[in-house]
Image (cartoon, grey):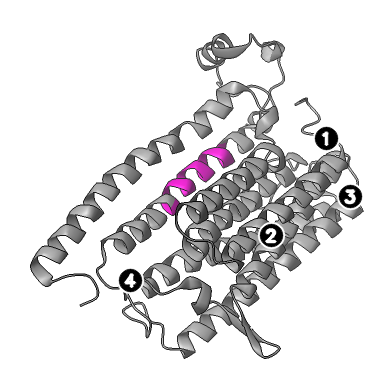
């Protein structure tokens, strides 16, 4: 736990997370190597990405041991990026629609 | 003045669980982030702002990619290397990923040994982290050189949508810049650890704050963040 001495955890914790990060990176590389396509590819990529991000933030950056006041202050604001993602998806669809309508179909 | 640099581990350390504890922390006197040195809280807030910057880059990449009528270049082929008579897809990027993860691992252990006040091994681990960082930037320079020689420019490329070049150079360039700055600061911190600044609480030349091993952890936060950003770039730009 957090104390005046700072974050001291067993070294083995870090070695395990290091290993897991290697394994998940390898998995996401395999997704490309075996040419997985469509929803399977995207969901696997996002899954491995979020798992790796969770390990790095939670364990390596010690967020798992911090107080909720800090966790919420740092991890909640990025959630609102999803709103931005939704907005820009709509915007991109609109642009694509306009381009196809006025400049001809895809690939021309 | 100097006292503000110190960790507050006052009586407020007792914490009610859940939302009640958050409200108590946020509405309390003087500081919301108990048990956390101010430098660490500020590093987290800086990283939060950096998150938004990289989000904007990745979002603009998403927008131009999904709105273009020209096919997007296949990253798997663009970033393949010719090794042993065959094209291995994305191999350089995979190696870069493993190197950056390894640097994160050595950094995490450096933080740990720093808090144990093992000066020598902390220095070595920070130097190993910096070395991996330099390797990463070097491979990125190689990758850029290869792509530029193949005709990729911010305004066009031989394989498809011209936005590929602009987003590639912008995103990986900004990330590489972060890694380079990180390496410089790693070397500075390594020198300070080696010299024993954090044991003697020697004051920093720029901030004049007392040196403490918490600085190694704050340096580590930045470095892990660089690795974190790469996780997202790897997934969204190279694999998508």
- Choose top left, top right, bottom left or bottom right for residue B187: bottom right
Q: Main secondary structure of the magenta part?
A: helix
- Note whether A22 is above or below B34 in the view shown: below
Q: Chain of mark 1?
A: A
Q: Tell me where residue B131 appears, x and y as whole percent.
A: 75, 68
Residue occupied by mark 1: A9
Q: Are marks 2 and 1 in contact (CB under 8 Å)?
A: no
Q: Are the residues under marks 2 and 1 on the same chain?
A: yes
Residue occupied by mark 2: A26
**N-term mark: 2 or 1:** 1
Q: Residue at x 67, y 42 (%)?
A: A55
Q: Distance of mark 2 from mark 3, alpha carbons?
A: 34 Å
Q: Which mark is residue B163?
A: 4
Position of residue B120 in the picture relative to residue B76 (left or right): right
- Note whether A97 is above or below B34 in the view shown: below
Quadrant in which the N terminus of chain B appears: top right
Q: Which residues are magenta?
A: B42-54
Q: Are the residues under marks 1 and 4 on the same chain?
A: no
Q: Are marks 4 and 3 in contact (CB under 8 Å)?
A: no
Residue A16 shown in magenta: no
Q: Nearer the viewer, mark 4 or mark 3?
A: 4
Q: Tell me where residue B16 appears, x and y as whole percent.
A: 63, 8
Q: Residue at x 85, y 52 (%)?
A: B122
Q: Chain of mark 4?
A: B
Residue occupied by mark 3: B119
Local crowd size for mark 2, using a 10 Å CA cut-off: few (<14), some (14–19), many (≥20): some
Q: Distance of mark 4 from mark 3, alpha carbons?
A: 48 Å
- Assign a secondary structure to mark 2: helix
- Assign a secondary structure to mark 3: helix
Observer-nearest residue: B155 or B92? Answer: B92
């Amino acid at each position: 736990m957090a104390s005046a001495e700072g974050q001291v955890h067993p070294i083995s914790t870090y070695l395990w997370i290091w290993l897991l990060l290697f394994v998940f990176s390898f998995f996401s590389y395999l997704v490309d190597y075996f040419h997985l396509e469509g929803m399977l590819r995207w969901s696997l990529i996002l899954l491995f990405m979020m798992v790796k991000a969770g390990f790095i933030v939670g364990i390596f950056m010690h967020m798992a041991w911090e107080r909720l006041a800090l966790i919420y202050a740092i991890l909640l604001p990025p959630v609102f990026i999803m709103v931005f993602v939704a907005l820009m998806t709509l915007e991109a669809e609109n642009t694509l629609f306009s381009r196809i309508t006025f400049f001809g179909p895809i690939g021309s | 003045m100097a006292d503000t640099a110190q960790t507050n581990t006052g009586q407020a350390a007792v914490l009610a669980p859940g939302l009640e504890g958050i409200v108590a922390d946020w509405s309390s006197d003087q500081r919301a982030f108990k048990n956390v040195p101010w430098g660490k809280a500020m590093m987290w807030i800086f990283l939060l702002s950096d998150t938004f910057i990289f989000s904007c880059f990745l979002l603009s990449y998403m927008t131009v990619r999904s709105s273009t009528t020209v096919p997007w270049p296949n990253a798997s082929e663009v970033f393949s290397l010719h090794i042993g008579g065959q094209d291995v897809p994305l191999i350089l990027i995979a190696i870069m990923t493993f190197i950056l993860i390894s640097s994160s691992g050595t950094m995490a252990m450096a933080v740990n040994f720093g808090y144990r006040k093992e000066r020598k091994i902390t220095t070595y681990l920070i130097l190993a982290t910096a070395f991996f960082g330099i390797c990463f930037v070097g491979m990125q320079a190689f990758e850029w050189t290869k792509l530029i020689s193949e005709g990729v420019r911010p305004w066009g490329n031989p394989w498809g949508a011209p936005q590929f070049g602009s987003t590639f150079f912008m995103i990986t360039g900004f990330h590489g810049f972060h890694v380079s700055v990180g390496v410089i600061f790693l070397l500075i911190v390594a020198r300070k650890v080696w010299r024993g600044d954090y044991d003697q609480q020697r004051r920093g030349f720029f901030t004049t704050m007392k040196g403490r091993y918490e600085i190694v952890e704050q340096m580590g936060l930045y470095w892990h963040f660089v690795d974190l950003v790469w996780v997202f770039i790897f997934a969204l730009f190279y694999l998508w």
